[in-house]
Image: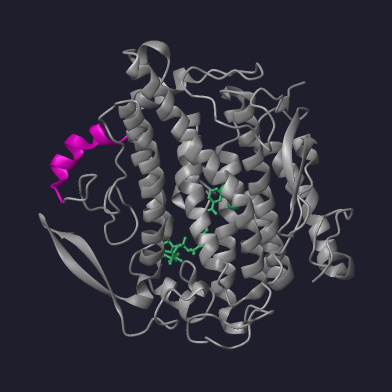
Amino acid sequence: MTAVDLNAKIPNNVGLADDPVIRRALEHWQPKYLEWWKDMGPSDYKESDVYLRTAVGVGKGGWANFGYVKMPDYRWGIFLAEPEEGAPQTVKFGDHVGEPLWTQVPGEMRNMLRRLVVTQADTEPASVEQQRMLGHTAPSLLDMRNLFQVNVEEGRHLWAMVYLLHKYFGSDGRDEAEELLRRRSGNEDNPRILQAFNKPVRDWLTFFCFTAFTDRDGKYQLAALAESGFDPLARSTQFMLTEEAHHLSVGENGVGRVVQRTAELMKQGVDPRKVGAIPLDIIQKYVTEWSTASYDLFGGEDSSNAADAFATGLKGRYREGDGIYKDPRALNQQYEVQVAEGDHLAKVEIPLRRAMNALLLDAYHADCQRIVARWNRTLAEHQIDTKILLPSLRFNRNIGIHGGKSYDPSGNPMSREEYDRRRPDWLPSEADYRYVQNCMVQVKERGKFANWIAPPHVGINEQPIDFEYVKIH
Ligand code: BYC
Ligand code: FE
Ligand code: FE
């Protein structure tokens, strides 16, 4: 295992000190990255001291430091997880199961692997761009700090992928690394690759839905790549997952705190709309919007790309290595899915290998059910009968076998006319967005929170809730 070098220009545990070609290439990319951060990272607050965690190693005991940092001075580093002790160093699935892991990219896998790495990489800066204005309307210093924490770590995730591009893909990789700093979320001429990463994130309810549902896609995609037969990819994504857990908790707890505040008001007989809080029907529409946009991120249910990525051993199933699947080759099995045919549902069978995106989406959906159930417990505790519904995997899809078909949020097929008529009941309208935007007021006093959100139960890193998480200068 290579030692952790924290004092280098680029902190790393990949031995950059002994790899001058790659080190120089990355040191050449570094100022361009900082330039991008300055232009497209969080708007303002560059001089603020933010109580941030910084990855400093990969050991199980303690991998991060907490302390005040000005964001542009954040130490973005490159870290690979240590190989699991005693774990077999062989490919776990696909056609090459049992063969030694790859430490270089086999020629025939090069294009596919590059596409996976670039797609993964592209989402990281995209999310920072999407969230760049939110600091101005943070509902508390603690939330502002969480936003900035997520942002700097998405920046580090970009570094993780750019290292792989430089190290394993030669001049093609260097070109891709430049392009990653050129595409812009929502830009018509040069957009980010995946749809959800071009959608605007203008308010904090969107941010919390994004981190609950879209970062959660990140978790599942990273988990699938963490099984990869290409060892450097597996170990980069394994380490990214340790940071990802915080992003997911920001989202899950964030939406949960909005639900709690609304429930408290309703229990007191106060109309949330009268006091600048967010009514349940709008929360439901936001949940519907961002969960379904995130379903699309899994790609098509029936996908030859996914079959190839599995067959070659580049992208596995969720927890592939835990021995929960009966056949590591996934041959001679079918995946069943119900698709609208006219006004009823018909069964479609997909050969299992082609259904890898659908399998991963199912694991993701079960996880989403769990967080929504938690929000619903909060409602029940406040004697509120309404429940938040996690929409069916068929609803509001643009990608895959349900793409462009009309279903209600429970997944029942319906005519296009009826769908168009009922759509405003299900998805946020311009008026809903405007209403939420109007609730967004910046709260900078320590320990105080905007009226639309409950305080969290605990602070960050065992600090009190009224800790000065951001010192705004
Ligand atoms: N939007 O065979 P198909 C994260 C394209 S999030 C636009 O059905 P495939 C994060 C597709 O590219 C995790 N286009 O699907 C979260 C293909 O185009 P080409 C990001 C789409 O290829 C928050 C065609 O449609 N990581 O980390 O099996 C904050 C047919 O595709 C979309 C990854 O995604 C879409 N939604 O699967 C920060 C992992 N879906 O090639 C970070 C890497 C599909 O025919 N990526 N298309 O021109 C992958 O594994 C796969 O590329 C996908 C797509 C799962 C995304
Ligand atoms: Fe990320
Ligand atoms: Fe994330």
Q: Position of residue 325 (x, y in %)?
A: 41, 76
Q: Quadrant of the N terminus?
A: bottom right
**Residue 429 in sight here:** no
At a point 65% along the width and 79% down the height, the residue shown is 105
Which quadrant would residue 302 be assigned to in this image? bottom left
Q: Position of residue 207 (x, y in %)?
A: 50, 36
Which is more toward the observer, 412 or 187? 412
* Left or right of 41, for residue 221: left
Q: Quadrant of the C terminus?
A: top right
At a point 51% along the width and 42% down the height, the residue shown is 211
Task: Check the image and report above or below for 255 versus 61.
Answer: above
Q: How many marks?
A: 0
At a point 51% along the width and 81% down the height, the residue shown is 312
Extent of the magenta region:
413-428
Task: Check the image and report above or below for 200 versus 320.
Answer: above
* Left or right of 138, for residue 402: left
Q: Position of residue 425 (x, y in %)?
A: 24, 32
